[in-house]
Each structure stands twice: as C-alpha cells, then as structure tokens.
Image (spheres, coloured by chain):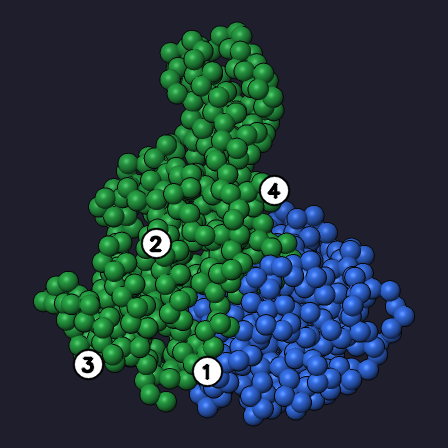
Chain colours: A green, B blue
Amino acid sequence: MEAVNIGLIGLGTVGSGTVEILRRNSQEISGRAGRDIRVSRVAVRDKAKPRPVDTSGIDIGDDPQAVVDDPAVDIVVELVGGETLARDMVLRAIDNGKHVVTANKALIALHGNEIFERAQAKGVMVAFEAAVAGGIPIIKSLREGLSANRIDWAAGIINGTCNYILTRMEKDGLDFDTVLRDAQALGYAEADPTFDIGGIDAAHKLTIIASIGFGIPLQFERVYVEGITGVTIEDIRYAGELGFRIKHLGIARRQEDGIELRVHPALIPRDRLIANVNGVMNAILVRADAVGPTLYYGAGAGAEPTGSAVVADIVDVVRALTSDPTNRVPHLAFQPGALAALPILPMGDVLTAGYLRMRVQNRPGVLAAITRIFADRDISIDTVLQKGHDEVNGEVTIIILTQETQDRNLGGAIAEVEALSAVDGRVNLIRLENLA
Amino acid sequence: MEAVNIGLIGLGTVGSGTVEILRRNSQEISGRAGRDIRVSRVAVRDKAKPRPVDTSGIDIGDDPQAVVDDPAVDIVVELVGGETLARDMVLRAIDNGKHVVTANKALIALHGNEIFERAQAKGVMVAFEAAVAGGIPIIKSLREGLSANRIDWAAGIINGTCNYILTRMEKDGLDFDTVLRDAQALGYAEADPTFDIGGIDAAHKLTIIASIGFGIPLQFERVYVEGITGVTIEDIRYAGELGFRIKHLGIARRQEDGIELRVHPALIPRDRLIANVNGVMNAILVRADAVGPTLYYGAGAGAEPTGSAVVADIVDVVRALTSDPTNRVPHLAFQPGALAALPILPMGDVLTAGYLRMRVQNRPGVLAAITRIFADRDISIDTVLQKGHDEVNGEVTIIILTQETQDRNLGGAIAEVEALSAVDGRVNLIRLENLA
C-alpha cells in the first residue's frame, strides 16, 4: 500500500521527538500499521533554526496553512502549542477533510467541544492521546480499555513539574524556591512556571480525563484549581510523620448529584501505590465499577515519551482511514448523542477531609477553643499533633486532620480559627484523600 | 442500528461476570459502542445449575456447537477454559466466519498461532485482552498504545495467587503452606494450585506478552518456568534486610542475539513501584525505547475484572465489524508477514544476578572456600551477609548476592558450593532483577 503522508505543524521538542521516532522505528511502526508512515511536510516558525533531528527528505516551510491545505497530506499533526494558530489550523484541516493528531492539552480542554463537533460533521478523526500524561496510553485505556465500566473516579499525578518539586522537597529536605530553581536549570520547569505550579496544566488534562471518563462535555472553566506554591517543607515533614505523602492531584469523581472536578495538593496514605510515583513521572489511578482500581504510570512529558503517544495516534488514524466513520471510537468516548448533562459540583459542596497547620500560643484553653470551632460545625477531628518541643516565642505548631465534611465548612472553620487571638497568622489547609 | 448478538460458551465465574456487566452497564456500553450488545445464547455444561446472575431473556442450552453454528450469533465469546473443547469451538466459530472473544490464556499460548492464522484467512478477529492480567488493558496498551516503540523488555506480576502468597508471607511472617491454605479458603488459590504456584499460568501470559511486544510467534514451550514453592519465609526476611522484596515475575527481554522468556521468583529493589504491588493485584512494567518505562496495574483475575476485559474486547470487535480486515490491529501486534524469527535464548545463556542462601559450618576458611569458587568462575560478589548470632549446631546462614553472570555459570558455582563438606544441604538460589 502507499505510504501515508504526515504534515507536521511545529518542530519543537515534541515535533522533533515525533520525527525521530518515525525515522528510527520505521520498520517496527510499518510492521504494525501495515503501511509506511512518513513526514512529508513540516511548517516551522523559523526555517533557519537548527533542529536536533534528521529532517532530510522533509519539505520544511514556514507556512502552516500550506501544510493544512496540501492535498498530498493525509494526516495533519499539530504540535505548535498555544490556542490561536493551533485552533485555526486544526479547524482548517478538518474543513479540508483531513484527520488530525494533536498533543495540545489547552486546545482540547478549551476548544475541544467545537473541534470535535466539526470533526464529527466532516467524518474525520481528531486524536489527542499525547495531550494527557505524555506517553502513558491513558486516553486509550479509559476510552477503550475500560469501555465496559461505569467510571467512579480518576485521580492523577498529571504534572511532572509539580511532582518533581514535591519529590525533591521531601527527599532532599529543600524548600520550594530552591527546588524550583533546580527544576528550571534541569529543564523540568519552564522559565515562567505559572501554568505548571499553579495547576492550570493539570486542570487542562483533568478536563479531558473527566470528559472521557464520564461522557460529559469539556468544561475547563468549572475545574477548581490550586497549585503547589502553598506547600511548605514543614507540611511535607508533618505529613510524613503521620504516614502521608503530599502529591499534586487532579481528581474527577462521580457523585450522586454531579461531578467533582478539582486540582490541588493532597495528603495521600504513603502505602498507596500512587504515593510512590516520584520525580517527573506521572500516574493516573482510575476506579471503575467492574474492573476496580487500575493504575497507569509513565513519563508525562519529554520529546520521545510524548512523541510515542503522537505516533501511536497516527497509527490508530492510519488503521481507521478506511473504516466506517460511524463505528470509530467517539472523541469523548461516548457517542455524541449519548453525552451526559451532569452538573459540575462547586468546590464548596465537595466532601473533603483536611490537614490544617497553624501556629498558636502555647497556653491553656487554646486547643479547646480551636476544637470547639470544629465541633460547632460538626466537623469530626481525626488526629491532633502538637509538639511541645518546637516552642518558639511561646508558640507551637498544631496539626489537625479532620474527617470528611463539605469543603466550604472547612473554609468557614478555618476563618474562625484564624480570627482567634491565640492563633498567629494563617492556617495552612491541604486536603486529604484516601483514594481507596 | 440493530443489536449485536453474543453467543457465550461457558457461564462460570468470568461468564457470569460478563453477563452481569453487559446487563448492569448496558447504557454506558451502548453509549460508547453506538449499538446495543446483548447475550442472546449461552451454552453450559449443566443447564440445571443455578447461576449467580440474571439470565432472563437468554437462551441457555448445553450444546456449544449450536451456539457457534447459530446464524443469529455475531460474536462467539469462549469462556469455557481448557484446551480441547475451547480450541474446537473457536476454530469452528472462525470457520463459520464469526468473530471470537476469549479469556483463555492456555488456548492462546498453546494454540494461538494456529488460531490466528485461521482467523486471518477468514478475515475475522480473535480478541483476547482478558487472557492476560484480567482487567488491565495490557494487550491494548502494548499492541496499540506503544505502537511507536521498540519494546526492550516487560516484567510482570501476572499471577495473583503467587503475589498473594508472597505478600502474606512477608506481611504476616507466615510460612508458604499456611498462606497457601488460607488462599485456598479465600478462593485466591485453586484446590489444585499447581498451575499457579508452579508458574505455568504466568508462563502462558508471558508467552502472549512477549509475542505482542516483540512480534514473534507464540512459543510457550520455550519459556523457562519456576514457581514459588522454593521461596521460604527466611528468604523473604533476608531479602527485606538487604532492601529487596521477592516477587514472582514473568520477564521477556530483547537481547542482541535473541529473546529471554522466563518465569521465576526474583528479588527486586523495594523502592521500585512494581515492588509495591501487593496481594492479588497484578502489574506489568514495560520498558520501550521512545516512551521509557510504563506500568499498568490492576486486578488480574475475578469475575468482573476479567469480564471488564471481555466486554471491552466485544466493544472493540463491534466497532470493527464494518472495518476493512486488512487495516485492523493485527492479532500479534505486527502484520503476519512482519513477524520476527528471533531465537528464544536458553536460560543458561541469560545474564542474571543471584541471591544465594546456604547453611555452613561456622569455622575458619569456609567463606574463603565458597568465595573462591565464585572467583574461579569470574562471578563478582556484590554482598555477603553472615550473622554470627544465628548459629545453631555450629552452623550459620550465609547470604551472597552476586553480580550478573550467565545463568549456567551460577548453577555451576552452586553445584560446587553444595559439594563442599562445610556446606549443609542445598543452596537456595533466587534471581535478582534490578528492573532499571
């Protein structure tokens, strides 16, 4: 059979990884796909820039539109990132009747509903395995591997930068700023790390996981987002003493009255498998009614891990080129007509347990006043840790672990505790997830 | 569209789980597949036997051939187990032009080459996700999710009975026989546990993993197989002291001159993620050139976890019903013409490191004599552990960890050590895998 021609937009990290894999493993890939796959054309911003990959035989230009409009291109692979140009090019490719593969999580999370609707109407595929957790085949596993199941929840370590920082803080006892600078020097964090450490990147991925898991439209704007900048080395140490590790999680959970969508740091029991996922690695734990818990682990970023997912998508699209469009795997796992209109629950309604750290004056009645506030709101306290020996200026640290309560209830109690004259400064809240 | 009719052979544990899932999650499943899927006909050995699942509306008979020959049946699901009847029925279904889904690892490992060749010729699919690691979508992940990669190796905890026994021995300090009896009482081990604890079941699964990973024909008869009956509570304790856990692994590794295929217990570093997979749970760690390491974790057995994989296969087959047979995912991941004729390496040629436990007389020169034997064979010793305080009748235990050497070299050294008059009884060898 004739070779399939790929038109690539963007030749940065992931683009170079994709080209390298298609070249190095061409025999393995065509042996699986049954057809040769070659990158025939690439559009880049700067044609003169040297690339870390052999581009011989590839037509390199600087006009993405020319790639998208080229009749010889069978599949457009969008690896340019961002939202504006990427959206324009993907929609134009679809309008031209071309299949699309993308690694762009922001594009899918923010414009996926529009893109998939257009693709559906044109009978083309838009594949996006690489948009979530890099090389881990989590989209395929959720959308196809678990198709027999009602998904109960998914919880993932889906931002490698956050996981690297939290892991180094714990293992080396370093503070956040020091580790962030290290991560930047090592290329594990961007020069502007806001999207990663602020949780936005994880929220993009969680949006996609939730849609596929529950069959709901993409709703990035409804995700509760908290980053890791509020996690201190003290929190990590206290959590460790109590048998927990702190991980930055994306959590999507089905409740009776709607769906929880939230990204925040969380204490999780140290003996959970996912608590042992360290460094830049990602993992997604999924609980489903028939299969029970399953976990998927691997590299969430990087040229070749992400390229691995891009190429797997290309192979999938190649296989489906001659298939009946109505029988393909639906973009959001469920047939367009079968999407559910489940509401996303406000964070205040979500049941959470809390880890609270505060500095208080070491005098009689303080702990009683604090615990009274929780009792008045019907919040059960699970654990209290107060260490006399860390007294400085007459103050000690108190750690409280609560049982589950509505999240707004926790917030209300904290505001009252902070108003006590014996409490110095803010109460640091990190949520606690059992993941059982 | 019309409903797809499933003809089921066998209504035991997995069959009942499959029927239950298709019934309970019918809305989720048809929402994904785009068509209703119903079990129309079942063949069982004993029609009178009560079943733990609602079978209303299903035509239950005792003639499997009638199911396979029924023109109204679109997909035959073989869940009868064993090799003889299963093989006959699967081949007959293929000859009738029907697609097949099976959970039968022995059938695929031993007769897969014949079955897939016949299926290929008839243009039908034979799906077998449930044959390996129950509900974990490992076949899909390896065959499709990692299609961009050259697979370097896979190492799996793929027998839940073995993992349960080893986990309980470690956690509760119990001996093998006690835990085996417990496992039998709890239903985690069969009345005749030979296939599980002897490693045959894991070898069936490893055979399939290796074929799909490397694109080689199924070669069960070439797998080196060792069970867990030689692992004692002492070994688990010493391994723990040295920073390792003992797990029963199936390992398939690509070497320059061939493929390693081996099933045996192994010490693995305790901080590896896979070392923390406990109880009846399974996990497969895969190392591939582009994506790096990925791990897949979940329940490897049980009615609904295995049924989850059966139903996912059914959905896949339903999706491909109208597809061009030449563009489907090949049974063994690679196109039939692209299978590799890589030799399977004899175990003696495989490079392994060893943990050796022996009882020796506590007198001068014994350790020197033992280590000399290793030195003469050019085997580097990594660690020696000898504890004076455990002396009984003038004998102490010595533990030796070696570096990598050819496996037959290790065997030769052990035979010489056992021949020393100062060494009492056998040397217990457990291999050591770094999995890095």
Describe the element under mark 1 as helix, strand or loop. helix
The kind of residue tagged 1 is Asn
**What residue sits right under mark 2 in the picture?**
A111
The quarter of the image holding the N terminus of chain A is bottom left
Crowd class of label 2 (few under 14; some 14 to 19; many from 20; radius 10 Å):
some
The kind of residue tagged 4 is Glu
Query: How far apart are the alpha carbons under marks 1 and 2?
Result: 31 Å
**What residue sits right under mark 1 in the picture?**
B327
| Farthest-out residue, left | A48
The quarter of the image holding the C terminus of chain A is top right
Q: Earlier in the sequence, mark 3 or mark 2?
A: 3
Describe the element under mark 2 as helix, strand or loop. helix
> Which residue sits at x=78%, y=84%?
B66
> Which residue sits at x=54%, y=58%?
A338
Crowd class of label 1 (few under 14; some 14 to 19; many from 20; radius 10 Å):
some
**What residue sits right under mark 3 in the picture?**
A57
Between B180 and B430, the one nearer to me in the picture: B180
Query: How far apart are the alpha carbons under marks 4 and 2?
Result: 28 Å
